[in-house]
Image (cartoon, helix red, strand yellow):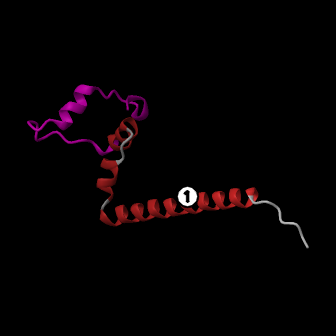
Amino acid sequence: MTERIGQPVTASILRDFAATSKHTARFPASLIAAFCEATGDDRLRLELAGPRLRKEIEFAKRELGAVERQREAQRLRDELLAEQPKRAKP
């Protein structure tokens, strides 16, 4: 995160943001992208996106999944067709 934002971010700083005893500590929005990248988890970013944008993202994920399944099905069809014995013409 330090490299990404150009400022030192230590474990201590992150613990302070997460501490339940420190009600005044806030996680800075400027750290969200770097935090999500460092952890490999976009849940924080998605939570802040709002319900409409989250629905659009979910829709896009499902559409991409459908396209991937169609491509896989087409690949299998092509393999099966290529393996069929050639029929002699009468």
Q: Is residue 19 magenta?
A: yes
Q: Residue at 61% of width from left, 59% of height from top?
A: 71
Estimate the x, y position of residue 27 in percent, counting from the top left: 24, 41
Question: Where is the N terminus found, in terms of image quarters?
Answer: top left
The x, y position of residue 40, in whole percent, is 39, 39
Q: Position of residue 32 (x, y in %)?
A: 33, 43
Q: Amino acid at mark 1?
A: Glu
Highlighted magenta segment, given as a residue range: 1-30
Q: Quadrant of residue 7?
A: top left
**Residue at left offset 42%, top offset 29%:** 3
> Which residue corresponds to mark 1?
68
Q: Please check the rendered image and state whether residue 65 is part of the magenta-colored stretch, yes or no.
A: no
Q: Nearer the viewer, residue 10 or 66?
A: 66
Characterize the local packing of mark 1: few (<14), some (14-19) or many (20 or more) Cα atoms within 10 angstroms: few
- Residue at image position (49%, 59%) is 65
Where is residue 55, by image quadrant?
bottom left
